[in-house]
Amino acid sequence: MTPPLLRIALPVPLWQAFDYLAPTEAPMPADPVGCRVVVPFGRGSRVGVVVAVDEDGAAGSDRDGLRQAEAWLDRASLYGEELWRTLHWAQAYWVHPLGEVMATALPVALRDARPAESIAARAYARAAPSPDGPAPRAGTLKARVLEALSTPLPESDLKDRVPGCARVLRDLVDAGLVDEVPAFALPERPAIEGPPLNPAQREAVDAIIAAGGRFQPFVLDGVTGSGKTEVYLAAIRHAIAAGHQVLVLVPEIGLTPQAIRRYRERLGIPIAVLHSGLADGERAAAWLAAGRGEARVVLGTRSAILTPLPRAGLIVVDEEHDASYKQQDGFRYSARDLAVVRARALGVPVVLGTATPSLETLANVEAGRYQRLRLPTRAGPARRPVIEVVDLNRRRLVEGLAPAVRDAIAEHARRGEQVLVFRNRRGFAPRLACHDCGWHAECTRCDTAMTLHRGEGLLRCHHCGAARRLPRECPSCRSAELVAEGYGTERLEEVLTALLPEVPVLRVDRDTTRTKSAFDALFERLEAGGPAVLVGTQMLAKGHDLPNLTLAVVVDADAGLASPDFRGAERLAQLLVQVSGRAGRGVKPGRVLIQTRQPEHPLLKTLLAEGYGGFAREALAIRQGHALPPFAAWAMVRAEAREDPAIEAFLGRARDTLREAPGITVQGPLPAQLARRAGYRRAHLIVEAGDRRALNAALGSWAPVAHAWPEARRVRWSLDVDPLEVV
DNA sequence: AGCACGCCGACT
DNA sequence: GTCGGCGTGCTC
């Protein structure tokens, strides 16, 4: 008897599956499709996933020279039927090799030849009854562990609360003071009641509940501070009470300890949190627990959408417009879009929440595919902030700030309130120039100016990470007069410290908050109130609720207004609204000042006069008029190489072949915005189709062929379907 | 992607 | 005379 033949997807960027003879050591699982197997590949071995089985070779397949798979890792598919089907859809939609898609969905620990049974999530609880004996001295690590375990905790939480407790924990377990229990089987705690829902929130919750058991996308369109999370929580409680699983996606920076705590306390059941700080084993344990239906609430960032959910009842995507939902390398999927596809496959409602819906989502609302639920007012006492545009033309700026803006910052801070100063550039100054000859410092490997980091005494390239010492004199004319041009967060911090010596000025950017814990500690301090000026980048724009913050300043709106990307306006409008949403979330009214040299810019005028909704309506009409996404389907073919001719050869051939596909137009090759990065030249094609299916079909049959071209081997190339940035 | 093989420059 | 550069080709 010959062993059955297995078609296996391997985690390699190859547009093909590989055939093997099934292992003979162990019996084949009843349904091997979706099971992991170890196979010899090249001179080593890999873990692949079975995508098809040919029991008796009836297909006339040629078995000569086939190698035999080494071992089964699973007795049943880890993916589950729905996720398996959805991943096939996803590989065809985002046009990526199936083996890599299947591997991306698995948690890292399961991409190796580890049996799933060897992975278990642990939790800890105080032993009951507690053995006699002297209690550990107060303040010791042991005492702190016992104190933290006043309620049972998953291992990862305990380690967050009592850092460095691993050793002590083992001792406590050995001494019988602490019990190890399986996570997700922890006892339920009474859920803490939230504030009563206002009528708009109630109506939204009722609509979501009414859709229970069938597919329906909702857009929860709520101004910042309107209490979207309360709507999620009420809908989630309803779903879990009915015995269903719920998946909640949040943007990368939204998964703070405060946010996690809120879900834990308000739901009263163990939550599987999937974040980047987790150990591989813990992550895999949470993923597997979800796949068995044990973890009832899964909370995580982008990749959490790739979790199996056999008992799903609801999917929530918070801040659906957030760019971090799109993966920017490898398998370039959009977790938000995949959430809708999965909800359809699972037959459950999906809630896309945001104060600033993406134009893609709005187009779906207009087309009647998504149902809009509005939360028009801020919950509680807070009112909309007053937004003013500050014209920088013909004003004498002092250190990058208009006098009126300086005065306002000082006034609010001296009243004991908090001020947010937003500037999307870290470092001291974006340029270092010679006053005498006009030279300025450029990166040797990228087409860009280097940023001055004065505190470190360095010039840094924000694109490739290169750093070099600050020159004392101009390398071109030897003049000693080198001037810092423009303002980054580091410089604004210095300027504002000088302006307000008596008020703490805190900088929040990647340079000051390298660790997540530093960031969280800072926000806990700010939540307590007290005057402060916060200077920072994007990191400051969203999520945090600071009731004593009454003034938000946008230092430079012009960079965003000048964006060459067709999505630039949308991004800037979302950013301005999100930054504005930080101001006036408590009892005191909020004020927002936007500095610009283009106060008459239509985007700003519309945004101020009609709010985000008005802006979005206009922007959507423009997109429609120009047949831009979401009214056309776009993809990009990107390529980079040391030399231009290699890129030209590949993209030229790519353009010529793609143009032959029906319904497809191609622009390019176009040089990338940053035409040289880290020593590589970069360019791309824009592939357009009026019909989404034409695009997928054209790219799907093109990519495997292009992969085999000799031109393709001389470049690094990638496909990006529904790209967020097209420059 | 890895990982071989393979044919030309600066080192013990 | 060798170590090693990365071009080219293959992986059931």
Image (cartoon, coloured by chain):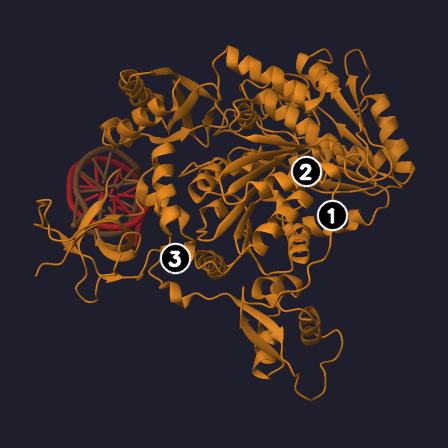
Chain colours: A orange, B red, C brown
Q: Is residue A430 visible?
A: no
Chain letter of disc 2 in the image:
A
Q: Earlier in the sequence, mark 3 or mark 2?
A: 3
Q: Mark 2 sits on what residue?
A: A203
Residue pictured at 63% horizontal, 69% vertical: A152
Amino acid type, mark 3: Leu
Q: Mark 1 sits on what residue?
A: A523
Is A447 in front, or is A362? A362
Is A315 in front, or is A632? A315
Contact, mark 1 vs mark 3 (Cβ under 8 Å): no
In the image: residue A156, left or right of residue A634: right
Q: What SS does tag 2 mark?
A: helix
In the image: residue A472, left or right of residue A599: left
Q: Is residue A136 visible?
A: yes
Is A602 in front, or is A695? A695
Q: Mark 3 sits on what residue?
A: A110
Q: Earlier in the sequence, mark 2 or mark 1?
A: 2
Q: CA distance from mark 3 to mark 2?
A: 42 Å
Amino acid type, mark 1: Phe
Where A126 falls versus A525 (above or below)? below
Q: Nearer the viewer, mark 3 or mark 2?
A: 2
x and y percentages locating residue A396 in the rendered image: 82, 16
**Are the residues under marks 2 and 1 on the same chain?**
yes
